[in-house]
Image: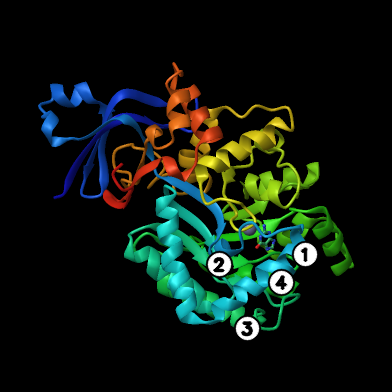
Amino acid sequence: MKQRFIRARGLHFPSPVFSEFDYFDDAILHIDNGYVKRFDAAQLFFNDGLHEDACEHHPEMLLLPGLIDAHVHFPQVEIIASFGDQLLDWLQHYTFPAEAKFADEPYARAAAVEFVDLLLGHGTTTAFTYATSHRHSADVLFEAAYAKSMRLVTGKVMMDRNAPSDLVDSLATGKADSEYLIKKWHGRGRLGYAVTPRFAGTSTEQQLHSAADLAAAYPDIWVQTHLSENLAELDWLRSLHSDFLDYFSLYERAGLATPRSVFGHCIHLSDNELVRLAETGGIAAFCPSSNLFLGSGLFPLPAVRDKGIPIAIGTDVGAGTSLSMISTLGDAYRVCQLQRFSLDPLEAFYMATMGNARALHLDDRIGNFCAGKEADFVLLNPSRNPQVARRVNTCQQIRDELFCYMILGDERLIEQTSVSGDIQFQQEPV
Ligand code: GUN
Ligand code: ZN
């Protein structure tokens, strides 16, 4: 039985209320064979007979549960920072050409291996990821995540219209390829499947229905798609559908409004759409760096939260500008500031850990250090960034320290990422 005792300053959120956090200046995380055995004040372990020498001791670092990215596109790493367009033109000019390269399986495999390493280097231990429309793009990503014991949910993108001919699937292949991947990968190790119709602009109504049929046939898979991101997108959808009511109806009518559906963006929803999203239990994925970069709009976090809609948070790379969930939280703060709402740093770090786990129905496995959880964690080292270290030295409270990390920090603060108790990323010693 492999045991690890990680001693550092430690924080987690044991309950769904972010203000009910546990923080210890001197904490120990005891990992037993990949699972959390106990997270507590170090002194209590020593009282129970643990010897200090058994611990990996990082007194200046902050131990946190592994970060969770609720919405990211693995083929889009190479188009982060593509100039000049908003959503629909950005898809045509940058995204589709980049995704077309994934027709080449060796290319896709190399990108998948690189992507998983990038996630781990950014402190992300769980990700909900879009592949491309090629079946093998999901296969190679599952393989790469499996090799690192990483928790990852992905799906081949379904799109049977309004995309280049080398990227579109068909009603038949979209469904058959998705089903093949569900049977092969869903529930294997820490992997899960999300049926992934890209958005209502690139799937026919029939394809949306067939995605919903899959979700109904395999009730513990997820659904992921995009919803109400950009105003020109809304106008375009209105012109595509003669009976257009609103954006959410396109998914609702097809049967895709389920409690396991992760809707990326949800920026321009009407009050009525928000009510229906709440009633059907769907999840809103807030992607702040993407929304700022593409100029899509401001996610109305307080209104969405007040309706009782579960909120997840993601990078949405490559419209998002970083794979770092830490800097994504800083962008979330800025987006909220523009709406006269100051996002509490404790709420922000809750969202990237326990909040995402809960919203995505994974809180029985990940999200905090409660006994029995899978031992995914990161160590943040403020001294990796001298400016952060200097600023953090002035902080009296963990809340202020977290705020410095999200505003000033990024993945360069990640000293170590462990997955199921094993180190999968470690920075070079200074
Ligand atoms: N809407 C449809 N496809 C995409 C995508 O790849 N990225 C973003 N941000 N929005 C989309
Ligand atoms: Zn997206």
Mark 1 residue crowding within 10 angstroms, few (<14) / some (14–19) / many (20+): few
Residue where numbered disc 3 is placed: 172
Q: Amino acid at mark 4?
A: Ser
The earlier-in-sequence mark between 4 and 2 is 2
Q: Nearer the viewer, mark 4 or mark 2?
A: 2
Asked if ligand 1 lies within 8 A of label 2, the reply is no
Residue where numbered disc 1 is placed: 89
Q: Amino acid at mark 3?
A: Ala
Mark 4 secondary-structure assignment: loop
Compared to residue 171, the image places residue 271 above or below, namely above
Residue appearing at x 42%, y 21% in the figure: 393
Residue where numbered disc 2 is placed: 75
The earlier-in-sequence mark between 3 and 1 is 1
Q: Amino acid at mark 1?
A: Asp
Residue appearing at x 73%, y 63% in the figure: 90
Residue appearing at x 40%, y 53% in the figure: 120
Q: Position of residue 399 (x, y in %)?
A: 48, 23
